[in-house]
Amino acid sequence: MQTCSLRRQWLHCSLAAWLATCALGTSVQAQGTSPGGTQASSGPSGAPVILVVGDSLSAEYGIARGQGWVALLEQRLQREGLRGTVVNASVSGDTTSGGKARLPGLLTRHRPAVVVIELGGNDALRGLPMSATRQNLADMAKAARSAGARVLIAGMQLPPNYGKAYAEEFAASFAQVAKAEGAALVPFLLKNVADGPDADQMFQPDRIHPTAQAHSRILDNVWPALKPLVVAAGRPRG
């Protein structure tokens, strides 16, 4: 019952609270820098570049630098013996429109082999048209593929107070875009975080942003879909 209560609390966070906390956020890394803060226009020894374009859920909002799932991804790559240079271009509070505007420059600068798109939640919470969100995600996926990158789209879910039909349509939008654009998909980035057995420990006091502890679970959600892209990126294209 405690878990269900916490999940309801998370899902019913007010729009005002979400926007207020997101508005306080800033980019964790300077745009186009690696987690270590150095420019990464190309990976060392030709290692494929993995570019993450996201919002506060990927920008280490409210936690120490190096504890977010994007930073943990570099460690996972090393443990798995996979070559890859991770570039985190996430900005707290960003929307798909903002990501779409930033993406061309990021693609030119970093020439990524894999692009992870973790955007869309702020669109709905700000009342932006869902059709525009879908189009922006599709345009980002197209641009990344045109630049030679493989694409992963990370999905999000909405509070039920937006209405069941609207929430279901929103959640389905990520899968629709991924299927149409040939992208890999993470259906729900916060699976086992917002609805896990210890969900009360997984969020910061704002009940919106995950704790450092939760970010390892976020990576666990991303990894099964991301790993095949990274492996494929390391092979010569036939």
Image: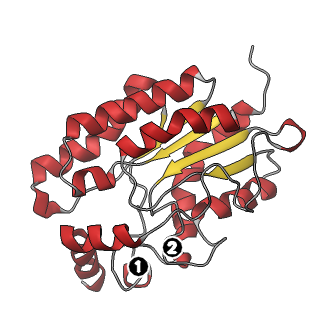
What is the crowding at mark 2: few (fewer than 14 residues within 10 Å), some, or many (at least 20)?
many
Secondary structure at numbered mark 2: helix
The spot of residue 34 in percent (x, y) is 71, 55
Residue type at mark 1 is Phe
32 relative position to 201: left or right: right
Q: Residue at x 76, y 38 (%)?
A: 48
74 relative position to 154: left or right: right
Q: Quadrant of residue 25?
A: bottom left
The answer to whether the residues at label 2 and label 1 have Cβ atoms under 8 Å apart is yes
Residue, disc 2: 214
- Where is 76 relative to 3, above or below? above
Q: Residue at x 23, y 52 (%)?
A: 124
Quarter holding the N terminus is: bottom left
N-terminal label among 2 and 1: 1
187 relative position to 127: left or right: right
Q: Residue at x 43, y 84 (%)?
A: 201
Q: Nearer the viewer, residue 195 or 133?
A: 133
Residue, disc 1: 203
